[in-house]
Amino acid sequence: MSLYEKVKRRGLSHLENTLVNRARPNQHPPIFITGSCRTGTTVVFQHLIHHFQTSYFPNVARHCSTWPYLAARLNCDCDPPSKNFDSRYGDIPGKCAPSDGWQIFHRWFSYFMNPRKTKLDHLRKAPRLVGLFERFYNDRPFLNKNNSNTLRIIELQYIFRNALFIHVTRDITATVLSVLKGRAENGVPPDQFWSVAPEKSLILFDFRDELELVVFQYLFCNRFVEIANKKLQLGIIFVDYEKFCPAPLQLSSALATQFYRVSGTPLVTRESHDPNLTFEVRGSLDHEMNRKITNIQAMISGQVNELAHAFCEQAIDVCK
């Protein structure tokens, strides 16, 4: 990187920090889509982006993580996103297309989640940053999909008191096969997590093989969300991917109802939305893999439950 580029980025980061400090916090309940990797969170995100008028972190903001608002202002407009449902492992193509904001969230959270490493003092600025994006997109509620936020819902609820959460689940066999394929294509070592997961130092679990690690990841994420939802009464909307695809408007209706109940204002529908939209269900008929996964579930479910409870309590303690 040239000296000019370094100076420019430092200056933009400083200006962004000034703007964030002066900004008002978000005025609408932010909406966070969560779920273990390869469960269909991206298609749910794309559907809601195209159905409702929302704000979001565009790709250019994600890649300029220390000055995301300025990156969006300099590169994007607030026209509705292209009606394109293409994606690859959660990434939607296009400089100004909606993103998961991966690098932005890593300013506040560890890569693999450890509640004690969360930078709460920095995270308290998040509502002001979201407020800037709301206003950039003409005062629209903020919508985000980020698989890693699955294990951050307690901290996000602590910072955004009126946040809404949508948690996506999918047939476990189809999910595991998709994760294994993605791990192979992305060169992930068999003993390492990929995407959302707790920091390994917190779970002290010896995995026999890659399959057991992937099954653990799926079970842990879902169990943690169930526990957090019950303990904190988060009112999470749970979405079954296989049921969502043929009838996505059921989710739109449920979200609109909950948003109005929390905020007293409606979610505005885009004029361009397609009321007849459906999606293809991508499933699995691998009975042998299903048998293996069922056996692993039976062996590790008790440990998963204990670890998820402990992880939840740790996150609650950090936010006290």
Image (cartoon, rainbow, N blue to C red):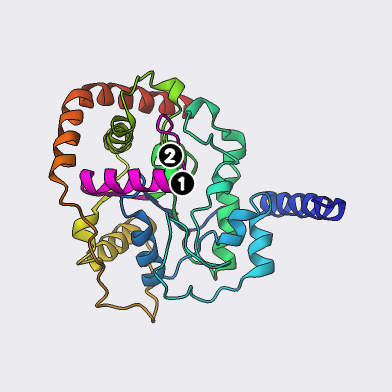
Q: CA distance from mark 1 to mark 2?
A: 9 Å
**Circle 1 residue:** 186
Q: How many marks?
A: 2
What mark, if any, has residue 194 been given in the picture? 2
Above or below, 212 relative to 164: above
> Is residue 162 in view?
no
Residue 266 or residue 59, whichever sits in front: 59
Residue at x 28%, y 43% (from the top left corner): 176
Instruction: Tell me where residue 192 sits by quadrant.
Output: top left
The picture places residue 32, in percent across and down from the top left corner, at: 41, 51
Residue at x 79%, y 49% (from the top left corner): 10
Evaluate if marks 1 and 2 touch, with contact meaning CB atoms under 8 Å apart.
yes
The picture places residue 237, in percent across and down from the top left corner, at: 28, 51
Q: Which residues are drawn in magenta? A: 165-192
Residue at x 39%, y 42% (from the top left corner): 150
Disc 2 element = loop
The picture places residue 202, in percent across and down from the top left corner, at: 42, 21
Instruction: Tell me where residue 193 sits by quadrant.
Output: top left
177 within the magenta span:
yes
Is residue 22 left or right of 313 when viewed as pictured? right
The picture places residue 304, in percent across and down from the top left corner, at: 27, 26
121 within the magenta span:
no
